[in-house]
Every structure is written in structure tokens, then in C-alpha cells.
Amino acid sequence: MGKVIRPNFGSKGAGNDGSAGDTRTVFAAVHVFGDARGCRVSIIHDEDDPLGDVLKIVVGKLESDEVEAVAIVPASREGKREAVTVGLAVLRTLELLESLDSEPHE
């Protein structure tokens, strides 16, 4: 697996500051892995990304319609397999964190 975690994950990029001139693109989820720790993990297909035709594994809060890409892979058969692997790993990580949050602290 290549470098799939974006270096600017969690930071506000140019144009994402909520200013009046901000335009946002709407994507439909190609696949939803599930929800954990108040977040949803999904795959979206972005044909217009500067990197080309890609699949993005995204995470967003359940109460929001905004997401952040945590991985970007080519929109190919191999890329789809990699996206599923990454998406499942992200969801499992959130589930583990959620279980740690619910354990009693000593």
C-alpha cells in the first residue's frame, strides 16, 4: 500500500475557511462503511480531482455534511480494493477508540 494518509488531514485548506466566496462540491457516497465515535466513514468518487479520477476515503461528523479525505487512491479496480481496505481500517480504529471511551476509568 502506498502513502494514503494526506499530510493536511484535519487542517483547513485554501478555500475551506467558510468565507462567503467559498464554493463546495457535493458528492454522493459510493460506499458507506459505517458509523463510529460520532463519525461516518465513506468512499466518494471524484473525477475532477487535480490528481485525476480518484476514490477518496472520507470521514465526517454525523451531524455535519462536511467530510475530510483521509486517503486518495486511483479510481481503478486495484484502487477500489485499496480504498475498501483503508476504509475498513479507519472504521475499526474509530470503533476501538469508541470502546476505550466507554470503558470505566480507574
Image (cartoon, rainbow, N blue to C red):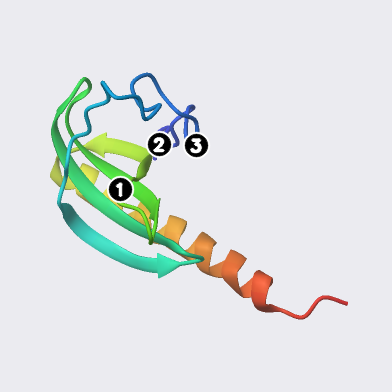
Can you identify the residue that label 2 sits on?
4
How far apart are labels 3 and 1 at the CA level?
21 Å
Q: Earlier in the sequence, mark 2 or mark 1?
A: 2
Can you identify the residue that label 1 sits on?
82
Instruction: Say few, some or many: other residues with alpha carbon within 10 Å of mark 1 (under 14 / 14 to 19 / 20 or more).
Output: many
Residue 83: x, y in percent? 29, 49
User: Which residue is rendered at x = 16% and y = 36% of the image?
Assistant: 46
**Of the residues tagged 3 and 1, which is closer to the observer?**
3
Q: Secondary structure at mark 2?
A: loop
Q: Are marks 2 and 1 in contact (CB under 8 Å)?
A: yes
How far apart are labels 2 and 1 at the CA level?
9 Å
Q: Earlier in the sequence, mark 3 or mark 2?
A: 2
How far apart are labels 3 and 2 at the CA level?
14 Å
Q: Quadrant of residue 41?
A: bottom left
Q: Secondary structure at mark 3?
A: loop
Q: Is 65 located above or below residue 18 in the figure?
A: below
Give the residue type that dot 3 points to.
Gly
Relative to residue 56, is residue 14 drawn left or right?
A: right
Instruction: Say few, some or many: other residues with alpha carbon within 10 Å of mark 2 (under 14 / 14 to 19 / 20 or more).
Output: some
Q: Secondary structure at mark 1?
A: helix
Q: Quadrant of residue 23?
A: top left
Can you identify the residue that label 3 sits on?
10
Is residue 61 something one can see in this rendering? yes
